[in-house]
């Protein structure tokens, strides 16, 4: 039987990497080949409530009000198995989760999703984990979730194994008026998952060795830039790093890309705006949406330009956001 508090609800925000994670050294444990650095965002988050119930014969997963089955459910059950093993308790859970991300945005929700699940499931089953331990646990669900435990700028230190591969807050309270503008580009086809994409890149791209070296350099330099509030330097590193990640997909065998026509359109616009003195930089992840880094004083001009090509509801302005919060 189950005595301790069996229910918890957690909110976790998504994060966008400025120095990307793109490849695993250990696939089972999700240990990355490189350290990475991200900014947690205020606008996109996941709320997850977990209740362990003696009477359940299997986990029940409800996403945005609908029962989840198949591979998506399996990934969550596999994660709950880790939590059950840690707690030494064999009991199933009801998981209710909802994303506050515009529908079909295709914005990384696995980061906020597994960070919220790690927090809620571990507390509901009676484990008292600190943030370090939560970050480690979240990693087992999705690499990028490691960073979503914390707010602001967060480094995921690659570490030397399961114990040391964790998120570390770099600057949690961001005292810098910057934004990430997400442009929601329609998904044309089913894309390659990040798990598959990073594996093919690591196994076959001839540039992978170079990628690892450059990430080390980018991480060191972007931390200096962020500390100094040097927007130009931070943006340039972020854009270059993202393009190098996408060069790994283009140079993989089989080759693939997350770019589509609209992604390229936004990238060209960003280059164009910079030439006209409106400073901004882009980054892109394992999907066609482009995210633009901009300082507050250029936000209005940027939005005006974007509105010429994209509907207003496809342009979402986000700012630095907080780490996980217990709602119950
Ligand atoms: O955590 P995953 O498996 O969704 O991988 C995330 C990979 C990128 O979003 C492309 C980069 C990153 O560091 O978040």
Image (cartoon, rainbow, N blue to C red):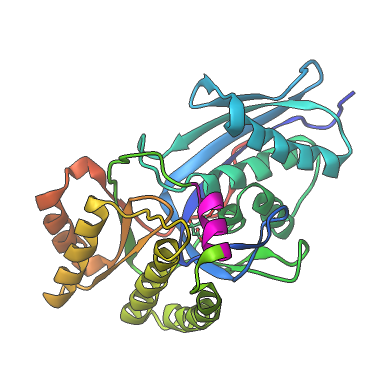
Q: Is residue 21 visible?
A: no
Image quarter (top left, top right, bottom left or bottom right) of the C terminus: top right
Is 241 one of the magenta-colored residues? no
Which quadrant of the view contains residue 2? top right
Q: Main secondary structure of the magenta part?
A: helix
Q: Which residues are magenta?
A: 193-203
Q: Is residue 15 left or right of residue 143?
A: left
Q: Is residue 268 left or right of residue 236?
A: left
Q: Residue at x 76, y 51 (%)?
A: 129
Q: Is residue 140 left or right of residue 256?
A: right
Is 197 one of the magenta-colored residues? yes
* Nearer the observer, 251 or 131: 251
Query: Residue 40 location, x and y as percent?
Result: 47, 58
Q: Residue at x 41, y 71 (%)?
A: 244
Which quadrant of the view contains residue 82? top right
In the image, residue 76 above or below residue 118 = above
* Nearer the observer, 200 or 233: 200
Q: Is residue 137 left or right of residue 148?
A: right
Q: Residue at x 27, y 46 (%)?
A: 185
User: Of all residues shown, which one is farthest toward the top?
Assistant: 55
């Amino acid at each position: 039987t189950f005595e301790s508090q069996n229910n918890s609800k957690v909110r976790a925000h998504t994060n966008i990497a400025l120095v990307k994670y793109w490849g695993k050294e250990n696939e089972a444990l999700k240990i990355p080949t490189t350290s990475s650095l991200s900014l947690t965002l205020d606008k996109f988050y996941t709320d997850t409530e977990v209740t362990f119930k003696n009477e359940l014969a299997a986990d029940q997963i409800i996403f945005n009000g609908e029962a989840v089955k198949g591979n998506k459910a399996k990934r969550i059950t596999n994660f709950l198995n880790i939590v059950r093993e840690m707690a030494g308790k064999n009991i199933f859970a009801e998981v209710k989760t909802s994303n506050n991300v515009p529908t079909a945005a295709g914005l990384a929700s696995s980061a906020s999703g597994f960070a919220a699940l790690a927090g809620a499931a571990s507390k509901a089953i009676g484990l008292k984990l600190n943030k370090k331990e939560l970050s480690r646990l979240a990693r087992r669900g999705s690499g990028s979730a490691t960073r979503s435990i914390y707010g602001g700028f967060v480094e995921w230190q690659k570490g030397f194994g399961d114990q040391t591969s964790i998120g570390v807050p770099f600057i949690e309270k961001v005292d810098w008026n910057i934004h990430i503008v997400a442009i929601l580009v329609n998904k044309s086809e089913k894309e390659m998952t990040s798990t598959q994409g990073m594996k093919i890149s690591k196994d076959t791209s001839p540039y992978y060795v170079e990628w690892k070296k450059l990430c080390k350099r980018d991480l060191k330099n972007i931390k200096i830039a962020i500390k100094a509030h040097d927007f130009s330097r931070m943006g340039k590193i972020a854009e270059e790093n993202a393009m190098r990640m996408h060069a790994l997909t283009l140079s993989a065998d089989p080759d693939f890309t997350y770019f589509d026509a609209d992604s390229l359109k936004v990238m060209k616009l960003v280059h164009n705006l910079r030439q006209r003195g409106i400073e901004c930089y882009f980054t892109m992840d394992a999907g066609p949406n482009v995210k633009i880094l901009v300082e507050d004083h250029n936000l209005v001009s940027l939005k005006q330009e974007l509105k010429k090509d994209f509907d207003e509801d496809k342009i979402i302005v986000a700012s630095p956001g907080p780490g996980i919060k217990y709602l119950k």
